[in-house]
Image: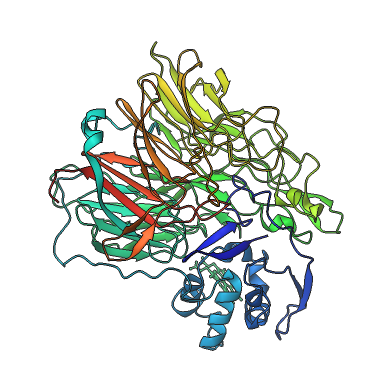
C-alpha cells in the first residue's frame, strides 16, 4: 500500500503503509492493496515457489520492470520475512534507491549480489524503492576547511533526546539564553539542505562547536555550528530517524574522545567517534526481520539503552504473511565497547502458533508492544521507563499501550501500567484483505511520546505519559499507579498526543495532533497546544491551532512532532510547517516562522521544509534555535532543511 508520487521538484511519499510503527498507519485516503500475484522463482537453489505480493509504488513501470525478476531470482529467498536479520522487503521499500544500490556494491549485500551486473543492481534498487536512481534531490556538500574544529570547552549540556535524563524536554534558562524579549530580534542565520531526502526526523545535538544530526538517506553529519559547513559525514545503512546521543565530558578536557550513539531504520545501532565520524561498533540487537529503531537510545553512566520497534504491522497486510512474531524490547549495552548487557521484552512469552487465518496461513501470538520512544532514566529509582504500542496479533497482553519500568541494571520489569486493554491491530485491518486482522481490531492507541519524570508545584514526583488516544496520564513512578488522567485531545491513529510533550515548573505542555484519519470519534478534533497543572491535572490554558493551510496539499493544523520548553517559552513545530514560540504562561503565540518557504542553503541549494514531525523537535541553546523541517511520509508535507535562528545583530 505504499504510494509514492512525484510532487513539485522533490518527491513526496503520499502515504506510506510501510510505516515504521503502528504509530502511523496509512492515511485513510490511501488506495487499497492490489490483488496478489505469484511469481515463479527461477533460481536454481532449494527455493520452490515464493509468493511475491506486488510492490505498491507510484511508478508502476518500476514495480513490473526488469527489477522484479532480479529480486525474485536473487533476493526474495531471504527478504520475504524468512531469514532472521534480513530486513523485510517492506523496509527496503522505504529506503532510497541509492542506499539499496550502495548495500549491493559496497555494503553488507556485496556477496549476495556479486553475480549481478551493474544494470541489474540498478534495476533491483529501483524496483524495491519505486524510485529512479538520481531522482531524489541533489545537493553538493559544503565541506569545512581541514583543521582541529573540536571545541573541548563546549561540553554537551545534555546527552539524551529528552534534553535531560528525565525526558522533560525542558531547557534551563542559562543554557537556552532566550527570553520573550529576544524574539523580535530572532532571525534565520543559515540553512542546511539534507541531500537526497524528503523528511528530516532526527533531532540535532549541539556540542563541541558542532551540530550532530542524522538524515533520511542514512547520512549522519557533523556540521559547523556557526557556519553550517560539514566537518565529516558517516553513512549508516538506512534512514537515521533517531536523534544522536552523545557521551558527556568535562568542559576543557582536550583529551576527550566522546562517541555518538544512534539507530537506523533497519534496526542497526551504532557508536561512532564525535571527532571523526569513525565507526567504533555496530550491532543489530534484535534478530527479527522487521525490527527497527525510531526512539533515540538513552545514555546513562556509560550504558546505552536502545528501544526496539518494528515494521511488522506492514507485511501483516499480506494474507500469506505468518503474522506476527515481533516483540518490543529494550536492549542495554556497554556504550563504549558495545558489549550487549541485557535485552528485556515487553511481552515475556514467546509467540506460538494460534490459528490459521482465512487464507490458511499460520498466525502466531502474542506479539507487538513495540517501543518507539526514548527511554526515560529514573535515577532515583534506578529504573528506566518506556511506553509501548499495541499488540499485532491475538492474544492481547497486559503490556501493550502501556508504560513499563525496567530495572537499569538487570532489565527486570518493575511495573507496567496498561492504558488501553485489548488493543490488537495491524495494517490488515485497514486493507481489503483482512485475513491477518485480529478479532480485537483495536484502535491503535500507542504511547508514542517519551515518558517524562517531573515534579508538581506541591513537590509530588510524577511519571507523565502521552497517548495517541489524546489522554495525558500521570502515574506514581514508584508503583505505576494512576494519579490523574486527562483527555486533552480527541485522539487518533496519528495522535492525539503523538511524539513528545514537555514539562517544567509544575506545568505539563501537551501538543495535540488530532490528524484526520478517516475514523469517527465521539468528540470533535481539537488540535493545538495545552497547558496542564501537574497537581490537579486540569487544563490551565489552551492555544487552539488556527488553520493557515489554505487548502495546500498535506498541510494540516495541529502538532504531531515533539515540543520543547524553556523558562517562559514553549517551542512547537506544526503539521502546517510553522514553527511557533508560545508564552508558557498564557499560550499566546509570540513568534512564528513558516519553514515551508524556500531558502538558499549554505551550499547554494534552494530547498524548503515541510511538516515538522517525528522526534525532530526544536532545540534552543545560547540564544540560538535549531529545527529540522520536512515530513514526507504518512500524508504530510515533504521537506529537507535544518534551520538555525539567532540574534540579528550577532555578526557570524
Ligand atoms: C541469503 C540471504 C540473502 C539474500 C539472497 C539477499 N539478502 Fe539482503 N540481507 C540479508 C541479510 C541477512 C541482511 C542483514 C545483514 C546485516 O544487517 O548484517 C540483508 C540486508 C540487506 C539490505 C540492508 C543493507 C544494510 O546496509 O543494512 C539490503 C538493502 C538488502 N539486503 C538488499 C538485498 C538485495 C537487493 C538482494 C538481491 C540482490 C539481497 N539483499 C539478497 C540476506 C540476504
Q: In the rendered view, how is the structure colored? A: rainbow
Q: Is residue 105 left or right of residue 70?
A: left
Query: Relative to 494, does residue 458 appear above or below in the rendering?
Result: above
Q: Quadrant of the N terminus?
A: bottom right
Q: Is residue 441 above or below residue 535?
A: below
539 vs 228: above or below: above
- Find residue 264 and report its horizontal and vertical position in percent: 47, 57
Is 487 in front, or is 251?
Answer: 487
Indicate left or right for 269 with 518 as reference: left
**Residue 230: percent from left, percent from top:** 25, 62
Quadrant observed for ligand 1 in the rendered image = bottom right
From the viewer's side, name the closer residue of 460 and 607: 607
Residue ranking furthest to the top: 458
Viewer-nearest residue: 226 or 445: 226
Count of numbered circles on the image: 0
Write the residue at 20% across / 56% down: 227
Amino acid at each position: 500500500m505504499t504510494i509514492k508520487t512525484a510532487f513539485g521538484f522533490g518527491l513526496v511519499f503520499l502515504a506510506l503503509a510501510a510505516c515504521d510503527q503502528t504509530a502511523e498507519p496509512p492515511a485513510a485516503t490511501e488506495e487499497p492493496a492490489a490483488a496478489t500475484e505469484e511469481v515463479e522463482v527461477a533460481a536454481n537453489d532449494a527455493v520452490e515457489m515464493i509468493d511475491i505480493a506486488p510492490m505498491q509504488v507510484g511508478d508502476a513501470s518500476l514495480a513490473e520492470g526488469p527489477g522484479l525478476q532480479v529480486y525474485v531470482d536473487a533476493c526474495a529467498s531471504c527478504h520475504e520475512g524468512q531469514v532472521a536479520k534480513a530486513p523485510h522487503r517492506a523496509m527496503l521499500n522505504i529506503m532510497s534507491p541509492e542506499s539499496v544500490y550502495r548495500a549491493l556494491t559496497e555494503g553488507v549485500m556485496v556477496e549476495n549480489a556479486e553475480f549481478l551486473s551493474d544494470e541489474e543492481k540498478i534495476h533491483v534498487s529501483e524496483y524495491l524503492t519505486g524510485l529512479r536512481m538520481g531522482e531524489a534531490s541533489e545537493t553538493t556538500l559544503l565541506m569545512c576547511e581541514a583543521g582541529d574544529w573540536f571545541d573541548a570547552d563546549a561540553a554537551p549540556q545534555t546527552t539524551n533526546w529528552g534534553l535531560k535524563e528525565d525526558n522533560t524536554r525542558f531547557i534551563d534558562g542559562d543554557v537556552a539564553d532566550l527570553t520573550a524579549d529576544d524574539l523580535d530580534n530572532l532571525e534565520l542565520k543559515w540553512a542546511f539542505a539534507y541531500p537526497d531526502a524528503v523528511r528530516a526526523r532526527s533531532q540535532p545535538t549541539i556540542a563541541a562547536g558542532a551540530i550532530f544530526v542524522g538524515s533520511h538517506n542514512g547520512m549522519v553529519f557533523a556540521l559547523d555550528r556557526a557556519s553550517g559547513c560539514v566537518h565529516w559525514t558517516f553513512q549508516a545503512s538506512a534512514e537515521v530517524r533517531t536523534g544522536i546521543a552523545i557521551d558527556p565530558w568535562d568542559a576543557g578536557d582536550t583529551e576527550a574522545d566522546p562517541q555518538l550513539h544512534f539507530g537506523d531504520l533497519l534496526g542497526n545501532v551504532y557508536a561512532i567517534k564525535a571527532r571523526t565520524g569513525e565507526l567504533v561498533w555496530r550491532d543489530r540487537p534484535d534478530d527479527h526481520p522487521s525490527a527497527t529503531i525510531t526512539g533515540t537510545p538513552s545514555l546513562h553512566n556509560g550504558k546505552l539503552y536502545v528501544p526496539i520497534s518494528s515494521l511488522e504491522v506492514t507485511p501483516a497486510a499480506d494474507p500469506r504473511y505468518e503474522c506476527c512474531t515481533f516483540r518490543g524490547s529494550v536492549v542495554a549495552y556497554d556504550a563504549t565497547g558495545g558489549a550487549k548487557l541485557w535485552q528485556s521484552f515487553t511481552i515475556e512469552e514467546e509467540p506460538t502458533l494460534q490459528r490459521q487465518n482465512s487464507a490458511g496461513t499460520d498466525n502466531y501470538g502474542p506479539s507487538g508492544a513495540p517501543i518507539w520512544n526514548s527511554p526515560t532514566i529514573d535515577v532515583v529509582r534506578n529504573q528506566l521507563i518506556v511506553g509501548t504500542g499495541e499488540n499485532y496479533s491475538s492474544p492481547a497482553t497486559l503490556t501493550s499501550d502501556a508504560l513499563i519500568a525496567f530495572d537499569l541494571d538487570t532489565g527486570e520489569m518493575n511495573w507496567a501500567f496498561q492504558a488501553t486493554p485489548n488493543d490488537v491491530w495491524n495494517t490488515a485491518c485497514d486493507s481489503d484483505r483482512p485475513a491477518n486482522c485480529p478479532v480485537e481490531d483495536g484502535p491503535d492507541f500507542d504511547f508514542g511520546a517519551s515518558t517524562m519524570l517531573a515534579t508538581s508545584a506541591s513537590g509530588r514526583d510524577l511519571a507523565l505519559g502521552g497517548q495517541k488516544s489524546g489522554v495525558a496520564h500521570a502515574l506514581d513512578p514508584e508503583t505505576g499507579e494512576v494519579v490523574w488522567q486527562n483527555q486533552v485531545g480527541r485522539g487518533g491513529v496519528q495522535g492525539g498526543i503523538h511524539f513528545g510533550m514537555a514539562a517544567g515548573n509544575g506545568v505539563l505542555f501537551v501538543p495535540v495532533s488530532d490528524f484526520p484519519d478517516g475514523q469517527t470519534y465521539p468528540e470533535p478534533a481539537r488540535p493545538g497546544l495545552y497547558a496542564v497543572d501537574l497537581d490537579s491535572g486540569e487544563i490551565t490554558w489552551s492555544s487552539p491551532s488556527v488553520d493557515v493551510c489554505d487548502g495546500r496539499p498535506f498541510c494540516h493544523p495541529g502538532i504531531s512532532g515533539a515540543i520543547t520548553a524553556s523558562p517562559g517559552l514553549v517551542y512547537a513545530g506544526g503539521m502546517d510547517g510553522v514553527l511557533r514560540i508560545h508564552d508558557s504562561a498564557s499560550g499566546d503565540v509570540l513568534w512564528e516562522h513558516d519553514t515551508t518557504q524556500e531558502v538558499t542553503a549554505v551550499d547554494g541549494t534552494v530547498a524548503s521544509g515541510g511538516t515538522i514531525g517525528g522526534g525532530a523537535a526544536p532545540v534552543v541553546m545560547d540564544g540560538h534555535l535549531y529545527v529540522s523541517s520536512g515530513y514526507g511520509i504518512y500524508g504530510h508535507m515533504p521537506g529537507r532543511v535544518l534551520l538555525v535562528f539567532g540574534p540579528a545583530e550577532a555578526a557570524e
